[in-house]
Amino acid sequence: MGSVGHVRVGTSGWTYPEWRGVFYPPGLPRGAELEHAAARVATLELNASFYALQRPGSYLSWSRRTPPGFCFSVKGWRAVTHERRLAGARQALAAFFASGVLHLGDRLGPVLWQLPPSLRFEPERLAAFCALLPRTTTAAAELAASLPAGPGGGAATAGGAPDSGAQSAPDDGADGAGAPVERPLRHALEVRHPSHARAELVELLRAHDVALVTADSAGRWPLLLDQTAGFSYVRLHGSPELYVSGYDDAALDAWALRVRAWAAGGTPPGARLLAPPDPPAPPGGRDVFVYLDNTAAARAPFDAAALAQRLA
């Protein structure tokens, strides 16, 4: 086997009432839940950013409360994906990055763009959106700075008002001289309408180096195994019951087999691909991000730990 990428397994979010007294010890303060989760998984998917623009101080807090080497994937704002439906989304995209995402510094992982189930495959619309995506933190900061000032402009925060510090350089991303550190910025796309299950989608995402999310969703949305970027992104939503069911040993073994193949730059045995072959992996193998989203019955953190153990 050649080089193998870095595999990170975690959960989609961490603030769930169902986890209290089950995953979180009884009496654990809610303000300590992030630290508890981050000590047990290598990565978390940050979901609050999908529902509303967050404040820079929130991103700074999340970054500082997690250990070195920890990683957040950040879910893109629904104004881009569900309201604008990717069309004419430049200003909403700028507002998303202006809200403080870059304040995660070296804890910032991929950005996840989840499409609504009703959005069909429209190659021109999707290609135009992919071309807008910033590929470095510097490009993201420049996009954020392009947001018009004044009423209707600026970085709208979760409270709806422009935040004067939203476009400042993240201090956690600075080098020893205090200058911002430029880092690559990776993007992943989760599609949900069955019209996306075609080779043209795979080729389009490969052309833009955007990862196609492999989503296990109890058969509700397409399960797509093609790799389209230099990293892999997997979301396990639960099977057979969406968001609820846990993964048994056989299912975890099967997913571990797939993840190992992707991390080594290969293709899982028996994988049904839309557009073979997969592109060559980077010299160090593919990084793989896996998020358990079967959160409703507190299965996600335990399944994440069991899968991570298999991949250790």
Image (cartoon, rainbow, N blue to C red):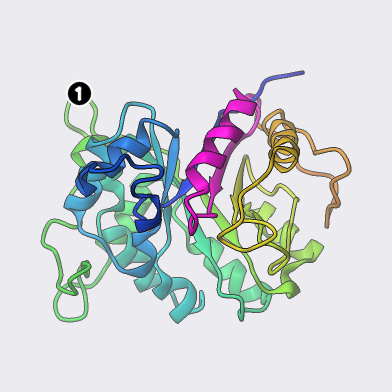
Going 80% across and 38% down the picture, which residue do you hit? 267
Packing grade of label 1 (10 A; few <14, some 14-19, many >=20) is few
Measured as percent of width and height from the top left, residue 58 is found at 21, 52
Q: Is residue 310 above or below residue 38?
A: above
Going 59% across and 37% down the picture, which residue do you hit? 288
The answer to whether 258 appears left or right of 76 in the picture is right
Going 48% across and 72% down the picture, which residue do you hit? 81
Q: Is residue 279 above or below residue 283?
A: below
Measured as percent of width and height from the top left, residue 276 is found at 85, 49
Residue that label 1 marks: 176
Tell me the quarter of the picture where residue 286 sits: top right
Tell me the quarter of the picture where residue 26 sits: top left
Residue 120 in magenta stretch: no
The quadrant of the picture occupied by the N terminus is top right
Measured as percent of width and height from the top left, residue 53 is found at 28, 65
Residue 292 in magenta stretch: yes
Residue interval drawn in magenta: 283-312
Q: Nearer the viewer, residue 36 or 270?
A: 36
Seen from this angle, which residue lies furthest right? 270
Q: Amino acid at mark 1?
A: Gly
Disc 1 is placed on an element classified as loop
